[in-house]
Image (cartoon, helix red, strand yellow):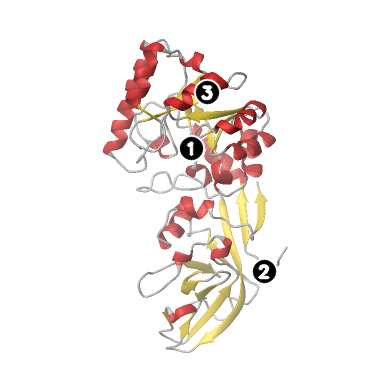
Amino acid sequence: MDDMAAILTINLSALCENWARLGSRIGKAECGAVVKADAYGLGIEHAVPALARAGCHTFFVAHVSEGIRARAVASQATIYVLNGLAQARMHDYRVHRLRPVLGSIPEVGYWRQHGHGCEPAALHVDTGMNRLGLRLEEALALLPTHRLHDLGIGLVMTHFCSSEVPDARDTAAQIASFARLKAELAASGNGAVPMSLCNSSGHFLDGIETYDLTRPGYALYGGNPTPDQSNPMRPVIRLEAPIVQIRHVPEGEAVGYNGNWIATRESRIATISCGYADGFPRNAGNNPQHEGGTAIVAGVECPFAGNVSMDLITLDITDVPQGKVKPGDFATLIGDALDIDRVAASARTNGYEILTNLGRRYRRQIVG
């Protein structure tokens, strides 16, 4: 392993503590876990076994290939595949006991005809996202003449659009639509079918029904599910990059590509071994149009000096006391005061992208 690679520390104890904390908020409902996108960049093979040991029984992935990986490390888990029915993968659904999330009437029909011997699928009913799922009217029209059990369906779910936004009107409308669906399920003799509504932020909506199963994702990995308040979750990742070189730059000289950063004083510049090829966002660069990212060096927050390059980032460490830092020391890019949401804001993106772009060049340390 390259000694100059940045170090990504993944804390599985924090991951499991976040899952337990979310589960404590939902009464008797089951708390599942969304582990798509390689468990938000942490690695399915690390995250899924840890969560399973902590008591998680139900996982959600995006693709069949992810489901196969999850099954390999969680033999007894229930695993749903979110991105619709892949008709060419019926053998894999059957052999690996994967449950597709059906999102259209044609998918329901195909599953009814060809899903024999498979575990029950989920039915996705769209309540406002307009992305995947049956429209509410389509689902309501299906219920009077069909028992979901006979269609091979064992879960009904929807997906929030804006649950992280306080008092969002579309959230209230979605909650009402799903309650209407529950009533129609009961009236049509399908009331025993479990239902799933809440994503990460849904766990923090006061006074709503949590139904039977929740599907947290972002909050498990340390993202803030309540952006208007302090983060109730523990940080799960830490990213540190080694300092390759420290140089003195006279006042008025430029640093980095295109001269986007000019020293306004006699400066010390540290170059660290990390860049956008490692998955760190290029938009975190500091230039006259955008105040970009920072790193913590010897306890001091130091702004980026110019662009984030492919393999390197330059930092203005002038405010770090002389003798407190040398080549080979590490700068913290994610960790302590620099949580994933703050790092994301500095790069004009969101924490989801920070997590799912975590690079393969990092030296990964699994703790907890």
Mark 2 vs mark 3: in front: 3
Which circle marks residue 216 in the picture? 1
Q: Which residue lies furthest to the right in this view?
A: 1
Question: Which callout, 2 or 3, points at the residue further toward the start of the chain?
Answer: 2
The residue at which mark 3 appears reads as: 111
Instruction: Name which residue type carries label 3.
Output: Trp
Q: Residues within 10 Å of mark 2 (few under 14, many from 20)?
A: some
Q: In this view, does 95 lie to the left or right of 351?
A: right
Mark 1 vs mark 3: in front: 3
Which circle marks residue 4 in the picture? 2
Q: Is residue 28 visible?
A: no
Q: Residue at horizontal 66%, vertical 55%?
A: 364
Q: Position of residue 164 (x, y in %)?
A: 37, 42
Q: How crowded is mark 1: few (under 14 residues within 10 Å), some or many (20 or more)?
A: many
Q: Residue at horizontal 69%, vertical 36%?
A: 72
Number of marks: 3
Instruction: Name which residue type carries label 1.
Output: Pro
Separation of marks 2 and 1 at Cα, in angstroms: 35 Å
Label 3, secondary structure: give it: helix
